[in-house]
Image: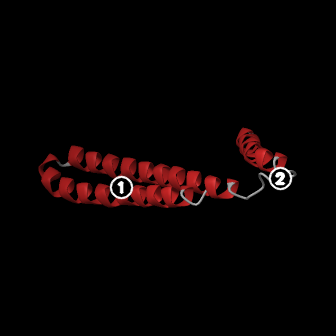
């Protein structure tokens, strides 16, 4: 229930300045949606990649703990996988920057 209230507060806080300036013609341009999209792009990319990297590293450590002789065979694919996961975060950053340049 608190999450719903927090999300409602954030949306109202983002919309309120846009609505307040809409009457005199200086605001109301609709750029708040672009800013919100940029923030969500970076935030969700970081969240997803953090969860994915934690899961991959945790499972690799468990595999090495169970079979220390396979550490070399586990470590190389894990590093490649972590690099691919990190590229998703960089794509989110690029999309966020591209959206912010439209404001």
**Residue at image location 42% in from the left, 61% down from the top:** 91
Question: Which quadrant would the N terminus be assigned to in this image?
Answer: top right
Element at label 1: helix
Query: Which residue occupies the foreground of this view, 82 or 59?
Result: 82
**Residue at image location 69% in from the left, 53% down from the top:** 32
Q: Is residue 40 left or right of residue 26?
A: left
Residue 10: horizontal and vertical position, in percent?
71, 43
Residue 71: horizontal and vertical position, in percent?
16, 50
Query: Which residue occupies the foreground of this view, 45 or 62?
Result: 45
**Residue at image location 49% in from the left, 56% down from the top:** 97
* Mark 1 surroundings: few (<14), some (14-19) or many (≥20) residues within 10 A: some
**Residue at image location 36% in from the left, 59% down from the top:** 87
Tag shown at residue 22: 2
Check if mark 2's residue and mark 1's residue have beta carbons within 8 Å.
no
- Looking at marks 2 and 1 on the same chain, the residue that comes earlier in the sequence is marked by 2
Residue 57: horizontal and vertical position, in percent?
31, 48
Query: Which residue occupies the foreground of this view, 48 or 102?
Result: 102
Element at label 2: loop
* The residue positioned farthest toward the right in the image shown: 23
Tag shown at residue 48: none
Give the colour scheme of this rendering.
secondary structure
* The residue positioned farthest toward the top in the image shown: 2
2 vs 1, front mark: 2
Q: How far separated are the C-alphas under marks 2 and 1?
A: 40 Å
Q: Quadrant of residue 73?
A: bottom left
Q: Is residue 99 left or right of residue 21?
A: left
Question: Which quadrant would the C terminus be assigned to in this image?
Answer: bottom right
Residue 96: horizontal and vertical position, in percent?
51, 56
The number of numbered discs placed on residues in the rendered structure image is 2
* Mark 2 surroundings: few (<14), some (14-19) or many (≥20) residues within 10 A: some
Q: Which residue is mark 1?
A: 86
């Amino acid at each position: 229930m608190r999450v719903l209230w927090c999300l409602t507060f954030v949306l109202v806080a983002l919309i309120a300045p846009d609505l307040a300036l809409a009457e005199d013609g200086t605001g109301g341009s609709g750029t708040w949606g672009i800013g919100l999209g940029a923030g969500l792009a970076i935030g969700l990319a970081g969240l997803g990649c953090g969860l994915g990297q934690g899961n991959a590293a945790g499972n690799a450590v468990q595999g090495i703990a169970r079979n220390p002789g396979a550490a070399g065979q586990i470590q190389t694919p894990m590093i490649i996988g972590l690099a691919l996961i990190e590229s998703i975060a960089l794509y989110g950053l690029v999309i966020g920057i591209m959206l912010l340049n439209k404001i």
